[in-house]
Image: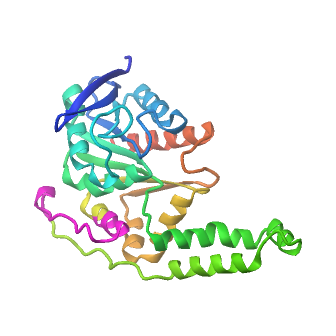
């Protein structure tokens, strides 16, 4: 069946969405959430191509622009303020695909972060596909830069050739490296605390004053469904996530959970810009979805 574009509303604001039907009797579908700033087609048309492939495999897919993004109305908002948009999108997905009982959220970058912050709120959301989740803090960025940029630069022939020939200012480079190291060594916020069991609606709101990685870890712990995590090898955001996991006992424990499936594309960049990378992500997603039936 052909994809269908439509509009739904959140607090009076129009949101633009596209439905890819899949099998009429499908009980589970995929909701693609955009990471800002971009829109429902995705970088290099990734979201569009993924939706088509999943629908061809029988899985219904809905992709949409949340408020203030792409062609949707409303004021621009942070990924940390998408709970009502996501809830309305799940409602709309179910209404337009009768029989749909379970929704898997698929998100890249801060859309993956938004999924972790909100999936526990809605029992209809039963799975997450997270690509290069955004865990940005000043300290985390500094550590990632040290490892991804400065150390590689010190190991490069071009840097030392430039230093010898006077094209590189050694004092400026040393000061920049020292400043980055100071930021990287700053202490981060406390570890997320455990939460009581029970229904999602009974859980207290997370403390907005806590660092983003801590709130994301808490969201992970509150969500009970399976998770597919895909990380790029040539991406600063993915490097920050890996470093965050290494620095945190809580995150290390979360990544050891049996419900997690983890995949890594060693050469891929943040948006999986090459066709071979996009195809691999789609293959992993479809394989994981079918395994979870």
Residue ranking furthest to the top: 1
Task: From the top left corner, tell me how far across and down residue 224 is, in percent.
Answer: 26, 57
Q: Quadrant of residue 191?
A: bottom left
What residue is at 30 percent from the left and 66 percent from the top?
Answer: 215
For the residue pair 163 and 34, the one nearer the viewer reads as 163
For the residue pair 175 and 103, the one nearer the viewer reads as 175
- Position of 226 with respect to 153 (left or right) is left
Task: From the top left corner, tell me how far across and down residue 276 is, in percent.
Answer: 62, 39
- Would residue 223 be counted in the magenta stretch? no
In the rendered image, is residue 11 in sight? yes
- Position of 93 with respect to 133 (left or right) is left
What residue is at 39 percent from the left and 35 percent from the top?
Answer: 70
Task: From the top left corner, tell me how far across and down residue 105 is, in percent.
Answer: 33, 45
Residue ranking furthest to the left: 202
Quarter of the image with the N terminus is top left
- Residue 178 to residue 12: above or below: below
- Would residue 213 be counted in the magenta stretch? yes
What residue is at 34 percent from the left and 36 percent from the top?
Answer: 65
- Position of 29 with respect to 207 (left or right) is right
What residue is at 64 percent from the left and 77 percent from the top?
Answer: 177
Task: From the top left corner, tell me how far across and down residue 115 is, in percent.
Answer: 32, 51
Q: Quadrant of residue 220?
A: bottom left
Quarter of the image with the C terminus is top left
Q: In the rendered structure, which segment of residues is drawn in magenta?
A: 198-218
In the rendered image, is residue 292 in sight? no
- Residue 171 to residue 137: above or below: below
């Amino acid at each position: 069946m052909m994809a269908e574009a439509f509009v739904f509303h959140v607090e009076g604001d129009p949101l633009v969405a596209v439905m890819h039907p899949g099998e009429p009797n499908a009980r589970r579908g995929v909701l693609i959430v955009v990471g800002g700033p971009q829109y429902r087609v995705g970088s290099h048309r990734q979201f569009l191509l993924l939706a088509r492939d999943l629908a061809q495999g029988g899985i219904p897919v809905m992709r949409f622009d949340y408020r203030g993004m792409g062609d949707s109305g409303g004021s621009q908002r942070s990924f940390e303020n998408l709970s009502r948009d996501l809830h309305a999108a799940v409602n709309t997905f179910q209404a337009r695909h009768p029989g749909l009982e379970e929704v898997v959220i698929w998100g890249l970058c801060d859309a993956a972060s938004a999924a972790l912050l909100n999936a526990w709120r809605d029992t209809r959301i039963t799975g997450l596909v997270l690509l290069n989740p955004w865990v940005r803090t000043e300290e985390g960025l500094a550590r990632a830069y040290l490892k991804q940029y400065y150390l590689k630069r010190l190991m490069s022939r071009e840097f030392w050739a430039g230093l010898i020939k006077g094209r590189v200012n050694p004092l400026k480079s040393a000061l920049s490296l020292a400043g980055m190291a100071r930021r990287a060594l700053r202490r981060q916020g406390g570890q997320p605390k455990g939460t009581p069991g029970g229904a999602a609606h009974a859980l207290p709101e997370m403390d907005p004053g806590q660092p983003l990685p801590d709130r994301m870890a808490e969201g992970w712990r509150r969500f009970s469904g399976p998770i597919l995590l895909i990380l790029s090898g040539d991406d600063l955001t993915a490097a920050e996530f890996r470093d965050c996991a290494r620095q945190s006992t809580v995150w290390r424990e979360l990544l050891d959970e049996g419900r997690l499936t983890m995949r890594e594309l060693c050469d891929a960049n943040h948006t999986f810009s090459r066709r071979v990378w996009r195809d691999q992500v789609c293959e992993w997603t479809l394989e994981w979805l079918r395994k979870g039936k």
